[in-house]
Image (cartoon, rainbow, N blue to C red):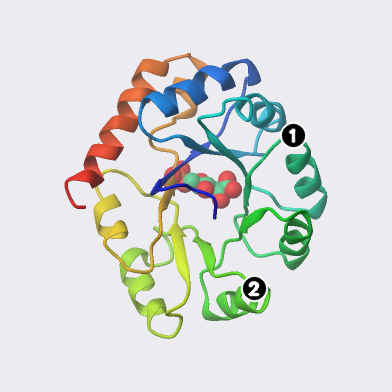
Amino acid sequence: MELGNNRIVPVVVIEQAERAAALGEALVAGGIPVAEVTLRTAAGLDSIAEMAKNPDLIVGAGTVITADQVDRVVEVGARFIVSPGLNPRVVERALEHGIDVVPGAVTPSEIMTALELGLTTLKFFPANVYGGPSALKALGAPFGNVSFIPTGGVSTTNIAEYLALKNVVAVGGSWMVPANLINDGEFDTIRQLCTDAVAAIQGDN
Ligand SMILES: O=C(O)C(=O)C[C@H](O)[C@H](O)COP(=O)(O)O
């Protein structure tokens, strides 16, 4: 997955596309130049298009549920696709476009289906519901070639524990990009939340 050397993927829920450019600048300034912009709002597509204009930012689409949504997010410049679950038609359409796709998979059967589709980097969501780090350790035994991006309940309190696992390539989360701060244009605060998140893992590297 095209993440550069980033190990934190901000999950963005944005209500106003006019906030997108400034949000992208805050992420870059805060040391996390990547964003998974979800399609959970009507502003998602336009926000991806706006943030994709920033050459310093890696922008992908989240909450991609259907193959049609894959076409639309590729059209506006998404560089990767994340899904909460595993829909083979979404995966196949993304692969047809030649774009990285990270579906959600938390059970051995889902993981085996993803492997069959040629994928080895998967979203582990909701991580806080499906057992967190201990579940990921257990899954690492039979699936040594699979990397996960745990998402759901991740924060500075547990990010180091997740990133210490050899089968965790990055974490996803919304804690550094709260929707209310985006809506209120509190981009200095978002930048600080990003630098705090980066600091939370630098001490453990
Ligand atoms: O929207 C999607 O496509 C999802 O899969 C859900 C998000 O990734 C999680 O809601 C993020 O979890 P928090 O960091 O606990 O807020």
The residue under the point 74% across, 34% down is 76
Between discs 1 and 2, the one toward the N terminus: 1
Location of residue 33 (image quadrant): top left
Q: Which residue is mark 1?
A: 76
Q: Is residue 113 above or below residue 9?
A: below
Q: Which numbered circle lies on residue 143?
A: none
Q: Which residue is mark 2?
A: 118
Camera-nearest residue between 195 and 138: 195
Amino acid, disc 1: Val
Q: Tell me the crowding category of disc 1: few under 14, some 14 to 19, or many 20 or more residues within 10 angstroms, Cα based.
A: some
The residue under the point 59% across, 55% down is 84
Q: Could you tell whether 168 is left or right of 180 in the image?
A: left
Amino acid, disc 2: Gly
Q: At which x and y percent is residue 28?
A: 43, 28
Q: Could you tell whether 169 is left or right of 68 in the image?
A: left
Q: At which x and y percent is residue 20?
A: 58, 22
Q: Is residue 178 above or below residue 110?
A: above
**How far, Cα to Cα, is label 1 from label 2?**
25 Å
Q: At which x and y percent is residue 152?
A: 44, 51
SS label for mark 1: loop
